[in-house]
Amino acid sequence: MTLPNEFLLTNLLRHRIRCDQGIDHGIGFKAWMHPPVHRLLGWVSRPSSFKLKRDVWRLDQLRGIGSQELFVKGTPVSSDQMTVERIPTLLEADILNLNGEKLGSIADFVFQPKTGSILYYLISRSDPRIPGTSRWRLTINRIMDQQPGMVSTNVESLEDLPLARVSLREDFLKKSRNLKDQLNEISKNTTFKLEGWLEDPPWDQSSDRSFTSNDSSFSDPLDDWPDGIDDETTDYSYSDKPMISSKGFSFDEAEEEDPWV
């Protein structure tokens, strides 16, 4: 059974430990770290909820990771709760920005099971025990100084760090900010186009293209209209063909047969 290249600490502590003799040693509950070099040395399990005995495991004892169990080789080191509480760790340490203001706390980290090297920490703004909270990724090169319970970074706000897991609230705020930025961009583009349209009207106001009555290209359509019916050169006589009315006879014939004349 091979080990993954990266593994989350909370997943490690969530699995039950089973040794090569088939004995169940309980679930892990605390990480054993070496903070100066950001390395995981091992972890602690609780074999029984009714006893004060604690089992401390070295990371090199880990042989495989199943869906719900961790397979280890060898025997653990027996300890007690008071000794375990003095094991150094950066979990739940406060994260400070450049101005010394608290940004959140370390809730988790990702490490390499083969070497124990911590790749990056996961920062929580609120209580990390609340399900569904957001996580920001803090790499090792962002850490400037560290003390028990406090880590100083070179960032100003959590927005400078990439999001590793987004909660519903953070996702809503992020989408709202993106929508607001898009609306501002559309408003700026519309204002710019409107100002350009007002400064450069589509019509041409030059006098060279104005139409006047004195323009040689302008002609009066009434110039070709005949001057009058008295013009001798124009023949306005009707056709010699008799006009037929709706009754079937011509107007000339009707005049000749009019009995009242």
Image (cartoon, grey):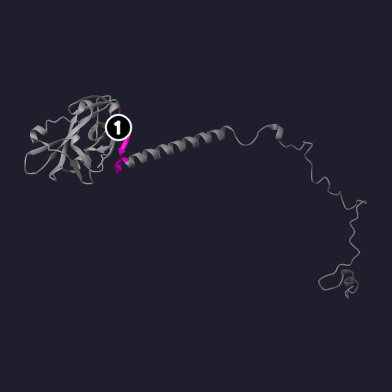
Please report the residue visible at 28 percent of the width from the left and 28 percent of the height from the top.
140
The C terminus, quarter of image? bottom right
In the structure shown, which secondary structural element does the residue marked by tag 1 occupy?
helix
User: x and y percent of residue 17 in the render?
Assistant: 16, 42
Q: Is residue 242 above or below residue 165?
A: below
User: x and y percent of residue 243 in the render?
Assistant: 86, 67
Please report the residue visible at 91 percent of the width from the left and 55 percent of the height from the top.
235
- Magenta-span inclusion, residue 16: no
Q: Is residue 59 visible?
A: no
User: x and y percent of residue 210 in the render?
Assistant: 71, 35
Give the quadrant of residue 18: top left
Please report the residue visible at 14 percent of the width from the left and 39 percent of the height from the top.
45
Q: Is residue 149 visible?
A: yes
- Magenta-span inclusion, residue 168: yes
- Which residue was labeled with disc 1? 158
The N terminus, quarter of image? top left
Give the quadrant of residue 177: top left
Give the quadrant of residue 70: top left
Q: Which residues are magenta?
A: 156-170
Please report the residue visible at 89 percent of the width from the left and 69 percent of the height from the top.
252
